[in-house]
Image: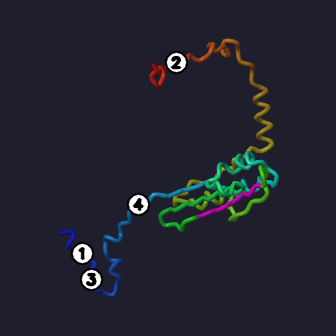
């Protein structure tokens, strides 16, 4: 009976759009957010300098998503984000090497970490993003409090000789 009622709703020819009054169109399935690749912030791009080694670049940007066997002097970083009700976002960045040294880098204008987080707005207000860097005063206060702590007693610092080791049988049977 419910199917007959819903089917009849789609056949109405009043001045309103049939899809707007059809209750079936009111229900939308949940779509999972699809996040792929490595997000690179403008802060990370700002740390890149020509002449850096491959290991230094990897420490700043992470492992590249694409490293071609045919173009060993180019690393590509690609990041895509597809969310329900939001236009898909895609960012691309490439770094080029000459030998083991960073020669140049180019790509899309990358957002800062705070800008990217604000783009992820899921309609829930979580509050202001806190500053994730200590000020000079906070660092000095932490050094003073660490220096002011008393030394631990010997009883508190005495630890067992070492962790007990467990011996497991071999995974493969010995050859006979």
Q: In this view, does 8 lie to the left or right of 95?
A: left
Q: Quarter-wise, where is residue 116 in the image?
A: bottom right
Residue at image x 68%, y 16%? 157
Residue at image x 74%, y 48%? 54
Q: Do the residues labelled 3 and 4 touch (CB within 8 Å)?
A: no
Quick one: label 4 or label 2, which is nearer the N terminus?
4
Q: Does the magenta stretch include residue 68?
A: no
Q: Nearer the viewer, residue 174 or 114?
A: 174
Label 3 CA crowd tier, 10 Å (few <14, some 14–19, many 20+):
few
Front: mark 3 or 1: 1
Front: mark 1 or 2: 2
Q: Which of 92 and 148 is in front in this view?
A: 92
Looking at the rendering, the stretch of residues picked out in magenta corresponds to: 90-97
Alpha carbons under labels 4 and 2: distance apart = 48 Å
Q: Nearer the viewer, residue 67 or 115?
A: 67
What residue did someone put label 3 on?
12
Alpha carbons under labels 3 and 4: distance apart = 28 Å
Q: Are marks 3 and 2 in contact (CB under 8 Å)?
A: no
What residue did someone put label 1 on?
7
Alpha carbons under labels 1 and 2: distance apart = 68 Å
Q: Residue 167 carries which label?
A: none
Alpha carbons under labels 1 and 4: distance apart = 23 Å
What residue did someone put label 2 on?
166
Q: Nearer the viewer, residue 19 or 138?
A: 19
Q: Where residue 82 sits: x, y (%)?
A: 52, 62
Q: Is mark 1 on a helix, strand or loop?
A: helix
Quick one: label 3 or label 1, which is nearer the N terminus?
1
What residue did someone put label 4 on?
30
Q: What element carries label 3?
A: loop
Quick one: label 1 or label 4, which is nearer the N terminus?
1
């Amino acid at each position: 009976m419910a199917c007959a009622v819903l089917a009849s709703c789609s056949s109405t020819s009043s001045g309103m759009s049939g899809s707007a009054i059809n209750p079936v169109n009111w229900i939308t399935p949940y779509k999972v957010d699809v996040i792929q690749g490595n997000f690179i912030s403008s802060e990370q791009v700002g740390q890149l300098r020509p002449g850096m080694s491959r290991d230094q670049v990897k420490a700043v940007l992470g492992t590249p998503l694409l490293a071609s066997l045919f173009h060993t002097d180019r690393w590509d970083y690609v990041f895509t984000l597809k969310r329900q009700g939001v236009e898909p976002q895609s960012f691309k960045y490439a770094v080029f090497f000459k030998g083991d040294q960073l020669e140049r880098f180019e790509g899309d204008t990358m957002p800062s970490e705070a800008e990217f987080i604000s783009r992820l707005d899921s309609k829930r207000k979580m509050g202001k993003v806190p500053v994730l860097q200590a000020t000079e005063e906070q660092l000095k206060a932490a050094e003073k409090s660490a220096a002011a702590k008393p030394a631990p007693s010997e009883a508190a610092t005495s630890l067992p000789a070492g962790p007990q080791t467990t011996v497991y049988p071999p995974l493969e049977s010995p050859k006979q």
